[in-house]
């Protein structure tokens, strides 16, 4: 050892200064090279490290500067950004689920998300919770990042900022974007059910006439904000894009005309939530029905089938959902039967029907009950309004022919038998039907051959409390309206006890019901042009609710 030291010292004294410097630097260069080679193989601090030293507290709510670190990846076919927090200091697994945000863009544009650690992300269309993913070094192929990183070493404080303009590109289908808006609407409605009020300058639903006024109000506003209907343009009048506006079937023509000129219509089928089949059952019956034909149903059903086959062959939307996001509307008694022209139309489609009879296949979970409104002149002029409860001397009133199984029972027990119970088959010529309704406290609304009847709306128009005597009937808009708060339901078996039931209602309770009927009347009024919350918008809202209940196949549940 001593000899080695003497040889080194001798060389140091006899060598030139440049040689001594070279002998000092050369070993350092060799050591540095070894460090670089080993370090590059063992770690990549930017992507493959087990811990990111920068905080995401401003991007992920609730994340702190010490524990809010995430790994992330975008997968082809996935529905959002997936990430998890790093392992805790104690070495445990400690994986945390993070919320992934899906944001919608325009129909043909790629979706882009800008990450910025110094601001909160924009309001999401949907929020998802996904399972934790493996560490980033095992999934490098999932990153689609476009940015320039500096090769300069990190500052001494070990705080690294995100690049200024990293962008992650992801293309969403139009259907995914539509479903994301529906998910946002569902979340808003659920929030309203918890009692959070919503401002509306025109009208705020309140009181017992609604099952849940806050949820209905929020749902209505979401409909106004998002709902779009595509009306197929195929077909010619008078069967298609046409319908009556001045009879008991007036809902058909009024809805078709108003929908085709409303803000809810979209000309772009890719933006539509539902697709409307614009045929009028009343027009089909009027122009195609032939009672001389042995099977008179066949040509009418063939007309409906041919039309659906036409649009199904031209557009992909019927086959995509098997008709579950398609809508037909009918106020004719034969509407339910013509909907059987195709099994999918009957079983899957949203059928808006006046004849909402559950014994004939009406399903409240997917079908819509709409009111039958008689507009003799196509307008409501002179039909709406009536005196106060104190100016109604008649207890209960009905006048009508022997249609169906219920009316004969009613007339058998009460026709011309009690001055307080004004039940007539035909009124005298000098007695006005509408004037008698305005003098009555209760107005009987029995079924005829079918369950639908315009008498319910006539009673509400004149301020008379409806008395429903119907079997298997779903009242209009009963998904929102609590009919028991402004009407009386009597079973067929209780027709002999009708007077006892009605006189058993206290004056105070009757006045409440009558005032509620006046308040709910706005939802059954026909307006030209339509007004918010009127019968046109309530029909649309019921269709909107059914569409909210549909999850189209192939779209991930968010």
Image (spheres, helix red, strand yellow):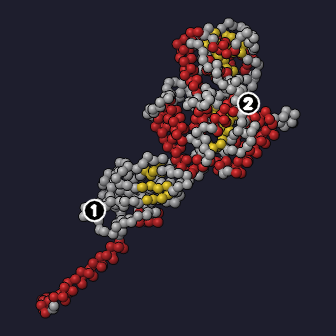
The one nearer the camera, 374 or 480, is 374
Give the residue drawn at x 45%, y 47%: 124
Residue 423 picture location, percent across and down = 70, 12
Q: CA distance from mark 1 to mark 2?
A: 77 Å
Instruction: Tell me the quadrant of the picture where the N terminus can be found.
Output: bottom left
In the picture, residue 238 is in which quadrant?
Answer: top right
Q: Residues within 10 Å of mark 1 (few under 14, many from 20)?
A: few
Q: Earlier in the sequence, mark 1 or mark 2?
A: 1
In the picture, residue 292 is in which quadrant?
Answer: top right
Give the residue drawn at x 50%, y 35%: 218
Task: Tell me the SS state at disc 1.
Answer: loop
Residue 380 picture location, percent across and down = 64, 23
Give the residue drawn at x 57%, y 25%: 522
Q: Residue furthest top?
A: 419
User: In the image, 397: left or right of 148?
Assistant: right
Q: Is residue 433 visible?
A: yes
User: In the image, 393: left or right of 431?
Assistant: left
Residue to which mark 1 is pinned: 158
Q: Residues within 10 Å of mark 2 (few under 14, many from 20)?
A: some
Residue 52 picture location, percent across and down = 34, 60
Q: Which mark is residue 333?
A: 2
């Amino acid at each position: 050892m001593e000899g080695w030291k003497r040889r080194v010292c001798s060389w140091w004294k006899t060598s030139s200064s440049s040689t001594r410097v070279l002998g000092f630097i050369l070993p350092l260069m060799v050591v540095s090279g070894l460090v670089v080679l080993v370090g590059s193989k063992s770690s990549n601090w930017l992507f493959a490290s087990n811990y990111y030293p920068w905080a995401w507290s401003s991007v992920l709510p609730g994340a702190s500067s010490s524990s809010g670190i995430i790994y992330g990846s975008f997968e082809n076919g996935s529905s959002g950004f997936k990430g998890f927090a790093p392992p805790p200091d104690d070495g445990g697994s400690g994986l945390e689920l993070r919320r992934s945000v899906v944001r919608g863009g325009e129909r043909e544009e790629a979706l882009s998300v800008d990450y910025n650690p110094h601001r909160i992300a924009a309001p999401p269309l949907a929020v998802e919770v996904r399972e934790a993913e493996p560490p980033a070094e095992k999934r490098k192929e999932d990153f689609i990042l476009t940015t320039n990183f500096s090769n300069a070493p990190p500052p001494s404080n070990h705080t690294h900022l995100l690049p200024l303009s990293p962008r992650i590109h992801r293309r969403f289908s139009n259907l995914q974007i539509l479903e994301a808006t529906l998910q946002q609407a569902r979340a808003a409605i659920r929030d309203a059910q918890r009692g959070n009020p919503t401002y509306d300058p025109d009208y705020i639903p309140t009181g017992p006439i609604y099952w849940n006024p806050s949820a209905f109000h929020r749902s209505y506003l979401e409909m106004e904000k998002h709902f779009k209907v595509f009306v197929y343009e195929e077909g010619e009048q008078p069967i298609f894009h046409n319908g009556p506006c001045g009879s008991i079937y007036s809902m058909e023509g009024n809805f078709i005309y108003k929908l085709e000129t409303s803000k809810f219509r979209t000309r772009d089928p890719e933006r539509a939530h539902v697709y409307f089949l614009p045929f009028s059952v009343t027009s089909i019956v009027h122009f195609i029905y032939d009672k001389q034909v042995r099977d008179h149903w066949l040509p009418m059903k063939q007309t409906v089938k041919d039309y659906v086959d036409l649009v199904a062959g031209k557009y992909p939307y019927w086959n995509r959902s098997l008709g579950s996001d398609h809508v037909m509307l009918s106020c004719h008694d034969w509407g339910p039967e013509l909907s059987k022209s195709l099994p999918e139309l009957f079983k899957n489609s949203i059928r808006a029907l006046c004849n909402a009879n559950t014994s004939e296949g009406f399903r409240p979970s997917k079908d819509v009950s709409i009111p039958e409104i008689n507009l003799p002149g196509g307008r409501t002029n002179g039909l709406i309004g009536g005196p106060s409860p104190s100016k109604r001397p008649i207890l209960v009133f009905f006048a009508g022919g022997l249609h169906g199984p219920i009316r004969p029972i009613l007339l058998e027990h009460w026709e011309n038998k009690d001055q307080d119970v004004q039940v007539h088959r035909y009124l005298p010529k000098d007695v006005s039907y509408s004037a008698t309704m305005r003098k009555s406290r209760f107005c009987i609304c029995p079924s005829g051959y079918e369950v639908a009847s315009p008498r319910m709306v006539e009673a509400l128009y004149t301020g008379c409390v409806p008395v429903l005597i119907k079997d298997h009937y779903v009242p209009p808009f009963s998904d929102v309206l609590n009919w028991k708060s402004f009407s009386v339901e009597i079973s067929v078996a209780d027709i002999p006890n009708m007077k006892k039931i009605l006189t058993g209602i206290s004056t105070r309770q009757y006045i409440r019901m009558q005032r509620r009927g006046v308040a709910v009347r706005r939802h059954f009024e026909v307006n030209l042009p339509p007004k918010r919350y009127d019968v046109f918008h309530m029909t649309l809202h019921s269709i909107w609710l059914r569409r909210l209940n549909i999850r189209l196949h192939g779209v991930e549940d968010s």
